[in-house]
Amino acid sequence: MPPVAQEPACPGEPPQAAWPFLADPLLRRSRSGRVCLTCQWFGHVADAEAIPLLLCERHRGLLSHGEHLSRRCPAWTPRLERQQGWCPEAG
């Protein structure tokens, strides 16, 4: 797991903006539905200039645009919504 990133230099940016980009040895090509976009750990935030940052909370790293559609890591986990339904607290 990569080291914990430092706080961003700009006070308006989310702390994830300082995370490093994930490298190729960790992310493998995937031709199935098991890609970063469908993983429980996938997330996104906007930086101070409203540019979306795609991130993996499990590895505390950023994903290059497009990588979330065609790559995954060995720690891929299905989203909880698929297991519990869209609104489990209502039941």
Image (cartoon, helix red, strand yellow):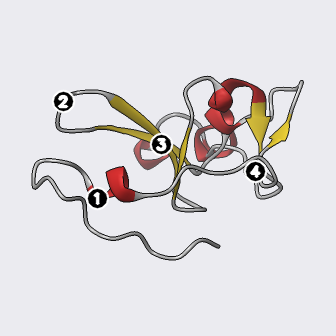
Secondary structure beneath dot 2 equals loop
Identify the residue under disc 3.
Answer: 43
Which mark, by number, is residue 15?
Answer: 1
* Precedes in sequence: disc 4 or disc 2: 2
Q: Nearer the viewer, mark 3 or mark 2?
A: 2
Work out whether 23 lies above or below 53: below
Image quadrant assignment for residue 81: top right
Whichever of labels 4 and 1 marks the residue nearer the N terminus, that label is: 1
Mark nearest the camera among 3 and 1 is: 1
Instruction: Name which of mark 3 and mark 1 comes first in the sequence.
Output: 1
Q: Amino acid at mark 3?
A: Gly
Q: Secondary structure at mark 1?
A: helix
Q: How many C-alpha atoms fall within 10 Å of the one at disc 2: few (<14), some, or many (≥20)?
A: few
Which numbered disc flags the more N-terminal residue, 2 or 1?
A: 1
Callout 1, which amino acid? Pro
* Residue count near mark 1 (Cα–Cα under 10 Å), binned few <14, some 14–19, many ≥20: some
Q: Does 64 appear above or below 13? A: above
Q: Classify 89 as above or below 33.
A: below
Location of residue 72 (image quadrant): top right
Q: Residue at x 34, y 50 (%)?
A: 17
Real-space CA distance between mark 4 and mark 1, rounded to the nearest whole angstrom: 23 Å
Q: Amino acid at mark 4?
A: Trp
Question: Position of 70 compared to 12: left or right?
Answer: right
Q: Which residue is at 68% across, 24% downward? A: 69
Residue 71 x/y as whole percent: 76, 35
Residue 46 image position (x, y, % from top left):
28, 35
Which residue lies under the disc numbered 2?
49
The quarter of the image holding the N terminus is bottom right
> Residue under circle 4?
76
Residues at marks 4 and 1 touching, judged by CB atoms closer than 8 Å: no
Question: Which of the two labelled residues, at mark 3 and mark 2, occupies the earlier sequence position?
Answer: 3
